[in-house]
Amino acid sequence: MMNFDLTEEHRLLEQSVREWAAREVGPRIRDLDREHRFDPTILPQMAELGLLGCSVPAEYGGAGMDYVSLGLISEELEYVDTSLRVIMSVHAGLNCLTLLSWGTEDQKQRYLVPQAQGRKIATYGLTEPAAGSDVRGIQSVAVKQGDRYVLTGEKMWISLADVADNFLVFAWSDLEKKKRRDPSGLSAFLLERAFKGFSSGTLTHKWGILAGNTGYFKMDEVEVPEENLVGRPGEGFKIAMFALDQGRYTVAAGATGLIRACRDASVRYAKERRTFGVEIAQHQLVKEMIAGMESNYQAARLLWLRAGVMKNLGRRNTRETGLAKWFATVASERAAGDAVQVHGANGYSDEYPVGRFYRNCKGAVIYEGTREIHKIMQADYVLGYRADRPTRCELPPYRPAADARA
């Protein structure tokens, strides 16, 4: 039987992250959003709180928290702004947890430890200008030359592209398999910003998540040492899908926080605004929208909590995490639209936060598996066309520090 009750440690973490984000970022987020500006001073504060390596064991520089804690952090951060949760998705989820499971001991010491401590910032490079959900469509290649690989290609829509120090990158290492679109020809590599031939840039015409850094990077014959190959040659597709299980989990929890933010903003406004002589909260159709936000918040939270408990137990959770990501992001889009509606004309102004919520929510419906991809996945599970099979490396079950030392 699964227990979804939060521990006292969970509740203390939830409260501390909530208070930090409200105090340090909340008062400034509207200006950061208006200025399309990522504030790098946020990162050392998150590192000091232990957030950047929250679910990495202490032996690798992390805080040793469980995976439910990662979800709680993601929910609280997105309650203030999506740009905060994105940091957790790419650094802690897609990169660090992937290295924890697939990295060699040498890679963990060189990359995971400084990342978990927040001394280095990391991200994930899969998407390309012509390849998103169709991973087999990527064009980046890695040619083996002696004791190194030479990588050439371009990645697009990369969170923290102009901020990160380290990059988990995917490219074709078998060019014959690339021609056949055989995913067993893909491999994963660790790159550093300082590698010769690496360059990055920021996308400046985004519609949402304006306080976050999103960009691209190019690899112009970047030489990568053979010891920076993650996993075995040809395991890149498995590693990429594994990483997405962790990233999608943070997206699901974050979108749940956005639903709650929409609900709370709508409740405040509905009890302040009066029309036809009464608070608009007394109008039935306003109540209907707020009730929808509440029901979707509770359902989304239960879905990501289930996935988090499964991660703690060391159980494969691709199906459950995908369902949580799909439901929560679609529900957040509806909640944001209804929140704007509750606010009426004021919802169309950035004097109120709901317009920012509306712009921010759409990205999560697209990235890390579009709404349509997740619909197909869930249908295939029910129809029996798809089943989760263990990979060579799985996310290690959570062990409290005392157990880990035993």
Image: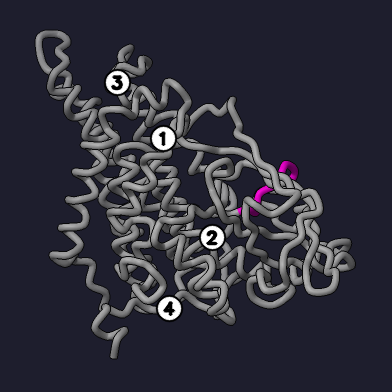
Residue furthest bottom as drawn: 406
Mark 1 or mark 2: which comes first in sequence?
1
Q: Which residue is mark 3?
A: 352
Crowdedness of circle 2 by 10 Å Cα count: few (<14), some, many (20+)? Answer: many
**Predominant secondary structure, magenta span:** loop
Disc 4, SS: loop
Q: Which residue type does callout 1 highlight?
A: Asp
Q: Nearer the viewer, mark 4 or mark 1?
A: 1
Q: Nearer the viewer, residue 289 or 388?
A: 388
**Occupied quadrant, residue 277:** top left
Q: Which residue type does callout 2 highlight?
A: Leu
Mark 3 or mark 1: which comes first in sequence?
1
Q: Nearer the viewer, residue 53 or 316?
A: 53
The structure residue drawn at horizontal position 66% and vertical position 69%, both measured from the top left corner, is 228
- 188 in the magenta segment: no
Q: Nearer the viewer, mark 3 or mark 1?
A: 1
Q: Is residue 350 left or right of residue 189?
A: left
Q: Which residue is mark 2?
A: 244
- Identify the mark at residue 396; answer none if there is no mark: 4
Q: Nearer the viewer, mark 1 or mark 2?
A: 1
Q: Is residue 336 left or right of residue 122?
A: left
| Marks 3 & 1, CB-CB < 8 Å contact | no
Q: Which residue is mark 1?
A: 39
Q: How is the image coloured?
A: one colour
Magenta residues (range): 125-130
The percent position of residue 97, horizontal first and vertical second, equals 47, 66
Q: Is residue 214 left or right of residue 341?
A: right
The structure residue drawn at horizontal position 18% and vertical position 29%, both measured from the top left corner, is 267
